[in-house]
Amino acid sequence: MDVVRSGSPCALCGEARPEFFRVYFDGYLKLYKCLSCGLVAQFPGPGHSTIVESYDELYSLDFADTREFLHPQRYKDFRDILDRVLTVKSTGRILDVGCGDGHFLHICARSGFECYGVEDAEKLVSYASAKTGAHVVQGHYSKHMFAECFFDVVTFLHVLEHIQTPVLALETARYHLKPDGVLVIEVPSIRSPHFLAYELTGIKWFVRPPRGVVDTHFAYYTPISLLALTRKTGFRQLSLTTGRVRYKHSGFLGHLGRIVDPLLDLAKVGGILYIGARDGNHGGSGR
């Protein structure tokens, strides 16, 4: 095992002892695994940190010339997420953190939700607002943006993996949620087939971008580490589903997903969708 000295504590559990980290991936950037909680993440320290501080330069509005949203293929995924939310919250205020072009909020607005968003990329803020009628705030998500107990639902859809301070982000979401509020998180999983193949063989080809190690991803979660994070920040699990191939692909792969998704979910392999509620017994930040 390669022991490393991290430049900062683990973003999930706060572990700082060098002997509790090992190199997980050593390619064009380095990832470290915390042996205390299992989180795999980039850390300032050995290797080159490629964390992106601003996403504005990564996006343009060129897509609007040919299509309504940047990733129209995500409609099935977004629709399924909303359908699951509707089983516990049929209406109210919803906040999508990292709302991008507003695609998910567009679907929520059509179902009667009062929609809000937070987006760091300034180029997308006005587009999302105009497209959805949502109130979209530009910047990094923080407590001062909204009032306490203001939202019925807060979502992080393929956003949490980009955030360097996930504990603070979810504590902020808990502050903004009503006592009966719902938290929704969708993240890629380091227990996806390509990552498992890399762990088994050490062949970096399996985790090449864009489906593997991505330089804008700070942390890589498993169902266990994600549940540890949500419990730490005052949430209890309502559901956790893995796989979800049928919602991410069309054609043959979409049909195949109907067969393999139950198996992937049973094995806790593939992308993670978590839905949770505020835990009324949680008495503090967990730090």
Image (tube, helix red, strand yellow):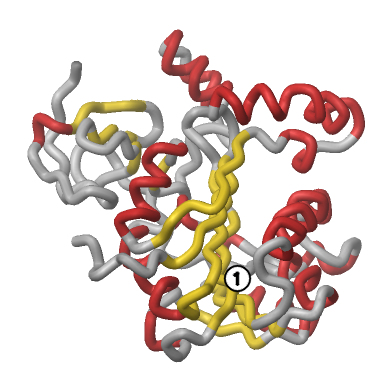
* Other-residue count near label 1 (Cα within 10 Å), few / some / many at <14 / 14–19 / ≥20: many
Most foreground residue, 18 or 234: 234
Most foreground residue, 171 or 4: 171
Up-down relation of residue 109 to residue 37 (above or below): below
Residue lying farthest to the top in this orientation: 201
Image quadrant in which the N terminus is located:
top left
Q: Is residue 87 left or right of residue 221?
A: right
Instruction: Give the number of callouts.
Output: 1
Identify which residue is drawn at 15% across, 44% down: 15
Q: Is residue 179 left or right of residue 261?
A: left
Most foreground residue, 95 or 215: 95
Q: Is residue 116 left or right of residue 63?
A: left
Residue lying farthest to the front in this orientation: 281
The percent position of residue 187, horizontal first and vertical second, equals 54, 47
Please give the residue where the numbered disc 1 appears in the rendered image.
96
Residue 32: in sight, yes or no? Answer: no
Identify which residue is drawn at 73% across, 79% down: 113
The percent position of residue 14, horizontal first and vertical second, equals 18, 50
